[in-house]
Amino acid sequence: MAEKNYYTIDPMGKLTCAKCRIPLEKGKATFGYLGNAFPVELPVCPQCGYIYVPEDLALGKVLTVERSLEDK
Amino acid sequence: MEKEHGFIGKHYLMKQAFGQEELHEREAVCTREDPPGCMAHCPLHIDMRAVCEQAAAGRFSKAAGIIRTKTPFLNLLSKNCDGACTKNCVMSRLGDGIALQALERACALYGGSGAVSRFMIPKKNKKAAVFGDGLFALACCWELGKKGYEVLWYTTNASFRDPLAGWGLTDEEIRSDLTALEGFRIEIRKQEALKQEEAKGFASEMDAACVSPELSWENLWAGAFTADHYKEAVLILQEAKYASLQADQYLQGIVPDGKREENKESRLHVTMDNVQGSQALTDVSHVTKESAMEEAARCIQCQCLECVKGCVYLQHYKRNPKGAIREIYNNLSIVMGNHMANGMINACDECGQCKAACPNGFDYPDVCRIAKQTMVETEKMPPSAHEFALFDQQFSNGEAFLSRPQPGFDTCKYMFFPGCQASAVSPATVELAYKDLCTRLKGGVGLTLGCCGAISKWAAREDLFKVSLDQFGASWEQMGRPTVICACPTCKKILEEHTDAQTVGIWEVLLTLGVKPVTDQAIAIHDSCGARGDEKMQKGVRAFAEALGCQVQDTSYSGDLSPCCGYGGLVKYANPEVSKKKAAFASGRADCRILTYCMACRDQFTRAGADTCHILELAYGVKPMPTPDISGRRINRLKLKQRLLSELWKEEFKMETMLPVTYAEGVEALMDERMILKSDVDAVLKAYETSKEAVFDQENGWLVANARLGNVTFWVKFMEGEETYTVFGAYSHRMTVE
């Protein structure tokens, strides 16, 4: 069975790793907070593994989940 | 193989804040659910407040329905009511009480039939007998009939009409009042005469009985109940209700308690702000539908709003303290699931306004304080609620902390403790005040720049509060246990309550030393929450303001009833929306400039766009500056420390150098709103300089780098110039990502 991803962002070739100078790709990552973990797909550098969390995601979904977990 | 024993999954820390008994005791302090005067004094306890509400809207059928829950005899009532309700109506204190008897009449005239669908009547397989001929007996038939009993009415009457004759009702009115008995299982057992010895003979046919007091039967048999004898219709109905209730309890197998619903003075405090007295618009003889509606609209719907009317927080959450403490109690009892009241608990500033306003002193802030403590102890406090503020306290008592005796002194008679907000918002005022005190006071004036610990106390972090008090205590001891001159009411209160230090307000000291008039402006004084209950402080500040030449104006909600500026209880951090609303309300109370004596209040009011200044800014001629952002507040404290150390103590204090950064338009305001410090941006850029890890955003042409600082990951959007970084945005999240 395919692993469930809570969120997926495709870099669409618009983001580059500044260190490795190669485009970021859609890659697996895990968000964690207060003992909970959520597998997601985010723009990741295929070489150095640098993971990018875009502003919209941080101030949207991530913030909402943070707040609901804090009230658990 | 033996299984290992241990916890599976999560285990939970539980602590009961207080028990149910204490909850009930606390709830009982509030009288908002007590009946209004009209209802409390009505022998039948009819909810005339609700009747007025319905009648004012022209819903006479619903209004009549409310009365019919207590008695079906509307015409009888309206012609024979003793008017205890009107006499005890709060409107009678200002003019005429509401003509409630006229409204009863209107309900009888326009309230429709009282007939009850027979399907709505419960059916019980027990029989209740009623002995008597008068109104008492008829009322008992209704009371027992509506409870579903089969009623055997032993009477000399030939019909239901007879008991209602003689009360001044027309045939039509009698017929109307009797519609309520339709559908009940009532059998008239006509007798030639009612005799006690014969009645006992019927005992095998009945399970219980109500006996009219008119019969004066004595030594009734088991299961037979009577009541007191009255001549007034309402009291007869009251007694019938009482006797029927006894019979009902007996029929249910409960030992009748003999308790009566008392007609006692209502405890309900009625908020009557701006209520004008008026004359009654109708009476029972002349009532029409229109005049009844107008009369009902005179009812002010008695309620107590003392706590709610001046508290933006309670209005925001649409709560009253009594209801809210039950929610909080339940919230603390949740083991697994969402703690829906966390936000509400953390949005209370614990300012004490509601407690001061309550006629009975209902202590809601105390419950919020206990709740916060419990949340911290059980690890249920949302980490994001107070973290920034706690770091701010750490900063005030760390990097920005300064404690020195006056140059030339080993110990001092006084210590000036301006508080962390004064140094952050108006450092020039702190400097001028300290130099002034040093010049005019004898015996040496030491200086301590730091936080009193109020922040950790508001966050219910007793551990950090103790650290803060210990730090203050050590400085105070080292300075020779001086009298502490405070410039903030909250600091003064905290130090007074939790340390051995003797404290005095700076306004008091300056008034003694002499004050020159600096203005002739009209001003309104905002009393901060730290001054609540401290009349001496409130008067002292007013005397100081008058000595400065101010024309002190009154505001609504002043003194002990003053609202919070929105900073107290760390609401500014836990719930910025409520904090802004509070600041707008508190600063909007006056038509003239608002003078504060707490720098946090001044800061909040400036942010709300009000014309305001701190009383020391006025005294020392410091022009109130636009409020600094969160980074500016820290830099102000550090620069003040640096300046004073260099000028007065000839010590060098080096501030950490930051990378050169230019902020694009609007970014600093955005960072202030998102609680991102310039030092956070600096840390991210320094991390980038070391690792060169970042993402290049091709669409916008900037780099985005991040760094994890404590419990937060900060991201910065920037471009690298030859001499400076240009920052285009910053954001953060608390989740880890890997």
Image (cartoon, coloured by chain):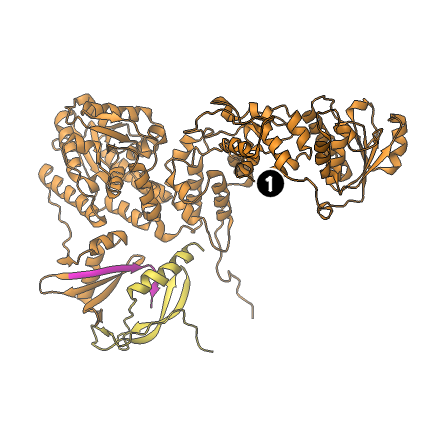
- The chain carrying label 1 is B
Residue B254 visible, this angle: no
Q: Residue at x 29, y 57 (%)?
A: B710
Q: Residue at x 59, y 34 (%)?
A: B47
Chain in yellow (letter): A
Q: Mark 1: few, some, or many residues within 10 Å (few <14, many ≥20)? A: some
Q: Position of residue B496 (x, y in %)?
A: 32, 30
Q: Which residue is mark 1?
A: B62
Indicate left or right for B546 with B407 as reference.
right
Q: Quadrant of residue B182?
A: top right
Q: Residue at x 29, y 24 (%)?
A: B539
Query: Was residue B355 drawn as part of the magenta stretch in this picture?
Result: no
Q: Quadrant of residue B240?
A: top right
Query: Was residue B728 drawn as part of the magenta stretch in this picture?
Result: yes
Chain in orange (letter): B
Give the extent of the magenta segment.
Answer: B726-738
Q: Main secondary structure of the magenta part?
A: strand
Q: Residue at x 54, y 30 (%)?
A: B36
Q: Amino acid at mark 1?
A: Lys
